[in-house]
Image: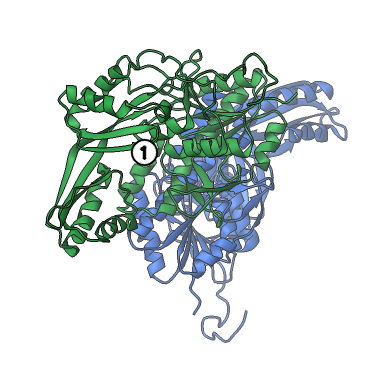
Chain colours: A green, B blue
Amino acid sequence: MNRTLVVQKYGGTSVGSLDNIRRVARRVKMAWEAGQNVLVVVSAMAGETDKLLGMANELSERPERREIDLLLSSGERVSSALLSIALHAIGCPAVALTGRQMGLLTDNSHTRARIKQIEAHRAQEVLGRNHVVVCAGFQGINELGDVTTLGRGGSDTSAVALAVAVKADRCEIYTDVKGVYTADPRVVPNARKLHVVSFDEMLEMASLGAKVLQLRCVEFAKNFNIPLVVRSSFDEEDEGTYICKECPDMEEPVVSGVMYDKDQSKITVKGVPDRPGVAAKLFSALAAESLSVDMIIQNVSAEGHTDISFTLPTAHLKEAEPIVDSVAKAIQARSVESDSQISKISVVGAGMRSHFGVAARIFQTLSDEGINVIMISTSEIRVSCVIEKKYTELAVRSLHDAFNLEHEPERVVEPEPASSVDPGDTV
Amino acid sequence: MNRTLVVQKYGGTSVGSLDNIRRVARRVKMAWEAGQNVLVVVSAMAGETDKLLGMANELSERPERREIDLLLSSGERVSSALLSIALHAIGCPAVALTGRQMGLLTDNSHTRARIKQIEAHRAQEVLGRNHVVVCAGFQGINELGDVTTLGRGGSDTSAVALAVAVKADRCEIYTDVKGVYTADPRVVPNARKLHVVSFDEMLEMASLGAKVLQLRCVEFAKNFNIPLVVRSSFDEEDEGTYICKECPDMEEPVVSGVMYDKDQSKITVKGVPDRPGVAAKLFSALAAESLSVDMIIQNVSAEGHTDISFTLPTAHLKEAEPIVDSVAKAIQARSVESDSQISKISVVGAGMRSHFGVAARIFQTLSDEGINVIMISTSEIRVSCVIEKKYTELAVRSLHDAFNLEHEPERVVEPEPASSVDPGDTV
């Protein structure tokens, strides 16, 4: 009989104290005793990474990224060793492995490395002996053998990548919330926890500011079709949110959630001569500095001139402004204006693919509240609007109500004919 | 022109705060600017190792030694990364390397591993580019690729071993004292810092309780003939103590220092039947438990019975007593007595080899102070006496005075004929 193989990832808060580490150990042991093979991935203890970074920044205005990686990687080594010790203490055999020992090979981009390959022989060997593997997340090595780290959300990404490498049945992400919600519960008190979300929806949500999962992690899970579970490390009852490929018998509501992102700013270049190549010049200058632009709109041209507006993360505004100014001068635009008092509200739902009228209902709802829509962008399963920042919470609550998200949705897809009656049928 | 290659080792206090790390960085840069190639070995920031061990011990009564090594090794990684960052910040190019990256291979004895081999290609390459290497001390890897640590004093030992591996001209040990003293300055206010000490003397001193250098480190330096310098990381003027092979033009005083060790206890087995093999039985039982015995005396036999006394570190007393009791019963000895109220006073000097009367002067001095000598042991360059613990400080001060140690010694060896006049002469 093959045992189920599960990857469990615990974030910084989940291993943030010795008591919490003991709690995680009990949780891991439960799964192990229930007959599962378990590979655990841990983050650094909460606060540790910031403490180390703070010291580096005190010593240098621009600390070397290679040394930062060596510095930060120690955080996950500590938590993985402690969790392994805690597991042994309660009679659950475990082996702590570093990113290097997990065979996690990355490119050379220190502090934001990309995973190239995983050679998980050592982990396979440990799992084969029915021991728990406790792996230091967030870290790998490059071809020189130097330590690299995977950047923000790196522990989640390494958890999914390791799940792929060891052919796990699923990857469970333990965090301090119960799962993925229809909206931020701090803003919408009657927000509902979702049972199931599709990879595509989760990708949209992650890129729209849902902090529960990082985009890269979801991309990885989707590409390799590893089901994710997001659940609380402090609540053993709640089953969390299951994230997987869409399948016929999955609930597929028209709208799954409402997201917001207040960390967006808008730059408008006014009086741009309307000739080919002008926009390209602007956006390649920004791309050259790795500044990513989100929405772009260009007004209808009037008298051979037009306005170009685009949004970008507020954190990049200071860096972008001088670049935009210099391009604006070069292309003889009239002026440049920045606005950080905006936010982006997004409505996401896989059911939008087959349902019309979602955008219309959004605009109507916002209009009813007297909220002006400044910019719009859409995908197959998402509608995003830029609005004035001060209306953010009002907009989220109104849309949550408008789509009746506090209640479980009715099924909007027909059940597959006979699929539940005749298991011999193939779809 | 070949640059001098120096290994500098900084202990936990020397890198115990960001200010101290900056101070060390300036010190390293000075040497580098003076045209030296520098390989720095650092300990964990003061207190860090104890903090990590404390957490492990809270989680488990007997934490796995393999996981302890992974846990503790993070401390030196942090300090090496921080020092490298601090060096870059003041314009001194540096590369931090872990024990693994230094190629420091050990046996499998976790938490007290022995160095087997060093493959220092990477360090050589960095030094060849005239960059400073900052190496995490105390750690290596075993043949499985698991992290190992070298146990107490391990950073000093790895510094000397690395000095051997990269063929350094000398190994400088930076600490919080100015060098090696004729006696503990806390006990003898007029104790004098020694300019030069021979490896043999330093070996005796280290094994007799001089805490400034660990025995293993000195053994290593002696075996591979790497000169050591012990000096303060807080005092740039003082040149510290130079420790090297004896050479003709070295000051060779009859007595170099007076050491004491209060952490000794004595066990006496009384009424032991005087027949061959009895002592062997006792001491092999202790050796089997890795309990090391220091001095041993056996009384003259009377009526077929004798008493055997030996000393051992007080820390091992509790473990040794039941073993001695059971052997005593087996060999039908009369009784076993322990005494932890003793201390060992030692007088060390390379000049003793050619000078007689040192032991006599020691006994006379102690006798003049009314101090009874309980046990005696000697080597070529050392005389040790066990006395009652309460007389420790009095004994050290009297002996320091008796051998006039507060003053620079007169030369006791003849200068090599003509060696300073005719440099063409070979010795």
Residue A371, horizontal then vertical, whole percent: 17, 28
Decide if residue A311 is in sight here. Answer: yes
Name which residue lies at 36% across and 47% down: A56
Query: Camera-side residue: B215 or B14?
Result: B14
Total marks in image: 1
**Furthest residue to the right?**
B276
The C terminus of chain A sits in image quarter: top right
Label 1 belongs to which residue?
Answer: A50
Q: Is residue B342 left or right of residue A60?
A: right
Compared to residue A292, the image places residue A382 above or below, namely above
Can residue B360 be seen at all in this image of the molecule? Answer: no
Q: At numbered mark 1, what does the secondary structure look like: helix, strand or loop?
A: helix
Residue B270 on image: x %, y %: 75, 25
Would you identify the image quadrant in which residue A17 lies? top left
Q: Is residue B64 above or below residue A250?
A: below
Q: Is residue B25 above or below residue A7?
A: below
Q: Position of residue A211 (x, y in %)?
A: 37, 31
Question: Mark 1 packing: few (<14 Cα in 10 Å), some, or many (20+)?
Answer: few
Amino acid type at mark 1: Asp
The N terminus of chain A lies in quadrant: top right
- With A389 as the anchor, is B134 left or right in this view? right
- Residue drawn 51% across the image and 39% down it: A220
Camera-side residue: B237 or A1?
A1
The chain carrying label 1 is A
- Residue at left 17%, top 31%? A372
Residue at position x 63%, y 45% in the image: A119
On screen, residue B76 versus residue A123, left or right, reads left
Q: Residue A41's x, y, as percent?
A: 54, 33
Nearest the eye: B222 or B68: B68
* Left/right of residue A212 with respect to residue B156 in the rendered view: left
